[in-house]
Amino acid sequence: MTNEPGSGDDTGRDDLVRADGSAAESETGGGADERTWEPRPVPEVTPETEAFWRGASEGRFLLSECQECGLIYHYPRALCPDCFGEDVTWREASGEGEIYSYSIARQASGWPDEALPLVVAYVELEEGPRVMTNVLDCEPEDVAVGTPVETRFVPTEKEDVSIPVFVPCDSRGRE
Ligand SMILES: [Zn+2]
């Protein structure tokens, strides 16, 4: 599996972090939180994305910000996808956003049945970029376009790599 997005030829506003792939094997398969927060496979970490994954492991969602044209973008790339500027810095996102679009997966190859249905969504961050992600800790029926969400981080088997997901803001306080 890989964290590399499918295309890198647009402006970066519709790019994605994949929180996909088969879930780590679970010996328990218990309640809802347990099933959704179990460790996930380790994405491919590249020099361009290493700081992003490490930030996520520290509970920070890092966006890239071009110092030449001002574009804030995600997924991480060394060159600005708009102006190809090289002066790109990290900027910590608020972690808040809203659902821009979503789909409910009721079958998913390689994904354990007990983890389904799964909400796959584009979340539009407060800062602008849209992120493909999962929305957890909710009933799929409660999700709608415009639902406010905030980020959480799912651990992987690698200590300095976590994967950002989102939960509805009204689940604040549930961990
Ligand atoms: Zn730029």
Image (tube, grey):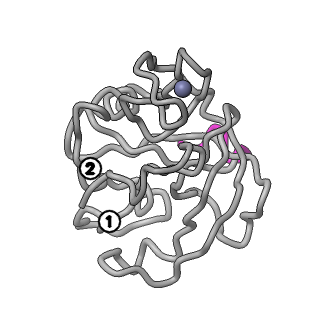
Residue 78 belongs to the span the image colors magenta: no
- Coordinates of residue 86 in the picture (x, y in percent): 40, 21
Q: Where is 157 relative to 87, above or below?
A: below
Between 103 and 84, the one lying in front of the other is 84
Rounded to the nearest angstrom, the CA distance separating label 2 from label 1 is: 9 Å
- Looking at the image, residue 156 sits to the left or right of residue 128; the answer is left
Amino acid found under the numbered disc labelled 2: Pro
- Coordinates of residue 19 in the picture (x, y in percent): 41, 55
**Residue displayed at 52% across by 30% down:** 83
- Residue lying farthest front? 83
- Coordinates of residue 4 in the picture (x, y in percent): 32, 52
- Residue lying farthest right? 146
Amino acid found under the numbered disc labelled 1: Gly
Characterize the local packing of mark 2: few (<14), some (14-19) or many (20 or more) Cα atoms within 10 angstroms.
Answer: many
Among numbered discs 2 and 1, the one appearing first in the sequence: 1
Point out the stretch of residues depicted in magenta: 169-175
Q: Name the residue under label 1.
A: 21
Between 169 and 11, the one lying in front of the other is 11
**Residue displayed at 31% across by 28% down:** 54
**Residue displayed at 20% across by 40% down:** 158
Q: Mark 2 points at which residue?
A: 43
